[in-house]
Structure formats: structure tokens, C-alpha cells
Image: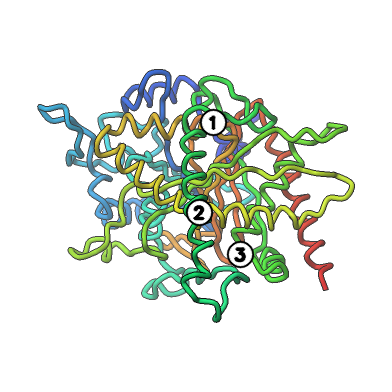
Amino acid sequence: MCSWKDKIKKYSFHYLLLVVIGEAQNRNMVNELNVEDGDSVLSVCVLAVLDSEIPIHDSPALGLLKHVFLPISPRFSSLMAEDENGVKHWKKVEVKLEDHIAMEQLPHNRPLWNIHIIKYPTSNAAGNIIFKLHHSLGDGYSLMAALLSCLQRADNPSVPLIFPSLTSAPNPNLSVRGTSIYRNIPKVLRSAFNTVSDFGWSLMKSSYVEDDISLIRSGNPGVEFKPVVISTMTFSLDDIKQIKTKLRVTINDVITGIIFLGTRLYMQEGRNKLNNEHSTALVLLNTRAIREYKSVKEMHKPCAEKVWGNQFAFLHVSIPELTSLESLNPLDFVWKAQKLIQRQRNSGAIFLTARLLEWLRKFKGPEATAKYIYSTIKNSSMALSNIIGPVERMALANHPIKSLYFMMIGGPESLTIAMVSYMGKLRVAFKTEKGFIDPEKLKSSIQNAFEMMLKAAQDIA
């Protein structure tokens, strides 16, 4: 008969990748944080999971948290409080690191983050460190910058981490000639029309227009309180770059196309005829006018740009429909994804959405902002997010990191997909509504989509 330690060791991998958030636990967190407005509730946390190549030792990790992690932002050692006028603000408190280790939920009387250290080996790592941070502390950019500030290059800690260069796909519409103002008038008018159209559509999607019920959207009330399953899969960036090069698109276009095609294949499984429900993906975007992460020192410079906090917007991107299974060209999904994303990126709707969220925060308060974001997520079929990670191996307190991934939990959607690149690999994480979406079938469909696209790209002369 197995001891309890043997059982923990055996199932620790499933604890890590199949994180189940209980309904009662999530409701308690929401009530404690008081982020509620009518029937809508929004209490989102970000999970960042690090896979260590060697067994984890507490002392160096905790020392790094105290001297590097906490100083990154005052919010890591603050609570949300109200003054005598009812205005909410961050209040500095004393932090005891031991109170933030391996807590089941985020209590209202301590800063809103905790850490789980899993010392039992898994099939992926010798140990794991899981950061759990409430979204009120910052968005994905802020929190990833904070995490990366705790990490160093494994081969040479004195050398800064290197990130892939950001490049854009060639635009056939750009030309050296034809710069006359009159020739640009149609483009300006088209951009203005698209801005009004896309922003209006975004407002409708955030208020009244819901996606169809489908195999990736249950539409059940209180989805944010139900248990979820988190699982991952990994792709080679070299394979993805092969498709990118052949199609003359971006890596993001390829990844989005793979996700869209794989999702449609999953939705179609077991059906004899095409049944294309109207489904949209909510693509989360960083709106800062910077293209790389800032170090802790740069964040704290008096003249530094404002890089901390929640500075994001979102795109509503319709998931392309399957027109035929017999004559399916998988590469069509890449081109369609590119066209949809480029249209909305160039329309100005992102800028207006970001300004709307900022206006809500300033004049209506956090509750109104949370309600608007909640409705936006709830009416969509999935949420998509991606982050660029370092090129070389990292280490946390002399613990080499084999791989990492992140995920947002607590939202009212049935499916969330989050991606991060690291050392030539792309780690894709899935948060799925437990008992509604089959994560293994979904991953199998996305793997099939990837293989179909890679073969089709390799067949191009």
C-alpha cells in the first residue's frame, strides 16, 4: 500500500499541469477582494510556472524573493485600502515571506501574491516553482518583467538576458513610389471606416452580442467559479519559422492560424457535416510604446516611462470557418488570421479600446472597468495571449530553468490559451472548463493542424 508521500510524488505532475480551482475557493477570493458588480464578477490571477532542472532548495530562492522580487513594485508589499472618502489606494504593509508560501488562496489581509514550491520530480522537471499573482498587481507585461528580473543567464549571470528581435511581415502594399497624398486618401478613408466599424463591433461584443454556444463555449453562468484543467504542449520554433518563411508572414500569424484551425477541427470532430458556429477569440495586447522588457533599475529611474500596472487592450478576432474538409488548405487559416489581425491593428480600434478602459478606470472606478472586461470575456469563445521569452537558458537562484509557461485563471471563459517562447521552443498552455472541454482531444486537434500546415508549407516550391 502506497504511503501519502508516494502518492504525492506520483501525482505531483498532475497537480502541476491539472490545476483545479474549486468553486467555493474562487467565490471566497472574489468576495474578499470585493470585485463585484451585479451578476458579474471578475477576479483574475496569473500563474507563472517554472520547471527546474535540479531539486529546489528553499533558502536561496527565498533570499532572492526578499531582495529582488519585493523591491520590483510597491504593490508586492501593499494592500488595497479605502480612505475616509471611500477612495481606494495601495497601502504599504510588512511582508512575511513565509506567509506567502503554498497558500491555497489569496487572503484579503496580505499582498495579493503567493508561491508554491514543489520539490517532487515530475516527467518534466526535478522541481517546480509556481508564482500566483492577482491581476490587480499588473498585467502580463508587468508581471513577466517582474519574473524575468528575478532570473539570470545560467551560463553568465552578469550578462543580461537576450530576447528574439521583433520583425514584421513584408507588406506588399508599401512601395517606394506612389507617396502622393492623393494616392493615400483611399487608405486613410478605409482606415477611418475600419476604426469606426471595428470599435463599434467591439462595443457590441462587450455589451450585447454573444458568441454561439459550441464545444469551446458552454455559456453556463458562473463559469469563472467552476474547476478548470491546465495542460500544456510544446512546439519547435524552427518548425514554425519554416512555415513563416514560406508564407512571408509573422510567427504570430502562424501560431494564430494553427490555434484557429486546430480549434475548428476539435469543434468539428464526430460531425458528418460542417457546423460552423460563430466564434471569436479575444486577443490580449500590450499597449505600451515599448518593444522590450525593462529591468528593475530602468523601472525605478525617475524619468522612466510608465511601464508598470495594467496597460492593455484587446482585439475581437473571428475564428475562420471551415469551408470543406475534403479540399481543406490549412495554410488558408494563416492568411485569414493575418488579414483579420492586420485589419484591426491598423484600424485604430485598439487605441480607442485602450482609451475607453483608461476612461472607465479614472471616472467610473475599478468596479465599472471590471464589469466591462467581464462582459467582454464572457461573450467571447476563447482568450489568447502570448509573451516573448529569452533565447538562452535562465536560472532562478542558481536553479537552471528547463521550461516555463503562464496562464490567467478566474475569467468567465471556457477556454484560454497562453503561449511563451523560450530557448527555441514554444510552450502552449490551455485552461479548459473541467468536464466540458476535453483537453487531450483539443491538443491532438491542434497538433494535427500544426502537422498539416508544416507539410503544406514544405510542399511549396
* Residue with the most extreme front position: 182
Residue 35's quadrant in the figure? top left
Q: Which residue is identified by label 1?
A: 379
Q: Which mark is residue 250?
A: 3
Quick one: label 3, few (<14), some, or many (20+) residues within 10 Å?
A: many
Alpha carbons under labels 3 and 2: distance apart: 38 Å
- As displayed, is residue 57 above or below residue 400? above
Horizontally, residue 177 falls left or right of residue 265, namely left
Q: Residue at x 35, y 42 (%)?
A: 356
Horizontally, residue 258 falls left or right of residue 210, namely right
Residue type marked 2: Pro
Marks 3 and 2: which is nearer the front?
3
Residue type marked 1: Asn
Residue 185 vs residue 65, the one in the foreground: 185
For label 1, the SS is loop
Where is residue 257? Give x, y as percent: 67, 53
Q: Which mark is residue 435?
A: none
| Mark found first going from the N terminus, 1 or 2 | 2
| Mark found first going from the N terminus, 1 or 3 | 3
- Look at the numbered discs 3 and 2 and tell me whether their residues touch, using CB distance below 8 Å: no
For label 3, the SS is loop
Residue 150's quadrant in the figure? bottom left
Q: Which residue is identified by label 2?
A: 55
Q: Residue at x 38, y 40 (%)?
A: 135
- Look at the numbered discs 1 and 2 and tell me whether their residues touch, using CB distance below 8 Å: no
